[in-house]
Image (cartoon, rainbow, N blue to C red):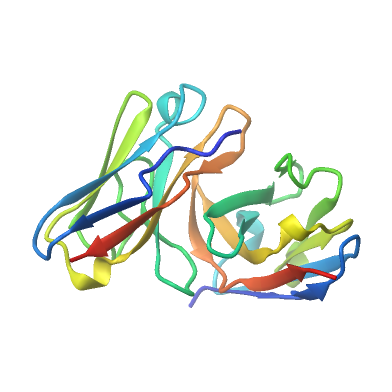
Amino acid sequence: QSALTQPASVSGSPGQSITISCTGTSSDVGGYNYVSWYQQHPGKAPKLMIYDVSNRPSGVSNRFSGSKSGNTASLTISGLQAEDEADYYCSSYTSSSTPVFGGGTKLTVL
Amino acid sequence: EVQLVESGGGLVKPGGSLRLSCAASGFTFSSYSMNWVRQAPGKGLEWVSSISSSSSYIYYADSVKGRFTISRDNAKNSLYLQMNSLRAEDTAVYYCAAREGYSYGYWGQGTLVTVSS
C-alpha cells in the first residue's frame, strides 16, 4: 500500500487559514469515510485531531476541520496560532483492512 | 487517565531480535484493536502491525511480514511486538496505539529501536 500524498510543507501567518491536502485512491481515501488527521510536535507522540473525515474528538479546537472530495481529503486550520506549528499526518482505512498514513506535512506559522 | 507505556527498545545488531512491550491503563484494553506504528528518524509515520481485541485478526505491513509477530495479553493489559531478523531500516521510534473505530485516539510515548553494528 503506497503512502497517501501530502504536501511536504505549508505555511501561514497568525490568524490566517491554511489547508493541507491528502490524496489517495479509490482503495483508501475515496472508498471510505475513515480519514483521520494527526498533529505531532517535535519529540512527541501523534495526537488525533480529526476522525472519520470531519469529526473532532473532545477537546480539539473547532479551528480544526476536515473534509473530503473524491480521493482527496483536506484538513483546514483557521485562525492560525503559533502552537499549531507542527507536523500533520493523514491516515485512511484501506481495502486491505489496514491503515495507510500520508507522508506528513510540516506547518510553519510565520 | 489513559496511559500507554512502551518498553523494550534499544540497540541491536543487524539480524538480531528484540521484544517490545506496551502496558495499557485507564481504558478497557480488551475492547480495543491495538497497533504498532513506527517513525524512522526524520521520517513520517508508518503502520507496522495490528491485532484485534480478541487476537482473531492480525495484520502486518509487507515490510515486516515474516519477521515481526504481534501479540497481546488482555489479562495483563499488554501488547507485544516480537521483532526478529532486524535490519538497519527497522531503526525507528515504535509507538503503540489504540484504535477506536477507524482512528488512533490513544498513543504511547514511543520506544526507540536502533539497529546498527
The picture quadrant where one finds residue B12 is bottom right
Residue placed at 8% from the left, 62% from the top?
A15
Q: Is residue B89 found left or right of B100 in the rendered image?
A: right
| Image quadrant containing the C terminus of chain A | bottom left
Q: Is residue B72 found left or right of A92 in the rendered image?
A: right
Residue placed at 52% from the left, 24% from the top?
A27
Residue B54 position within the rendered picture, expressed as x and y whole percent measured from the top left: 73, 50
Residue placed at 59% from the left, 65% from the top?
B41
Q: Nearer the viewer, residue A65 or A9?
A: A9
- Counting labels gives 0
Name the outermost residue toward the front: B117
Residue placed at 14% from the left, 53% from the top?
A17
Name the outermost residue toward the left: A15
Residue B91 position within the rendered picture, expressed as x and y whole percent measured from the top left: 71, 63
Residue A109 position within the rendered picture, expressed as x and y whole percent measured from the top left: 21, 65
Could you tell me if residue B22 is visible in this image?
no
Looking at the image, residue B6 lies above or below residue B106: below
Could you tell me if residue A6 is visible in this image?
yes
| Image quadrant containing the N terminus of chain A | top right
Looking at the image, residue A28 lies above or below residue A16: above
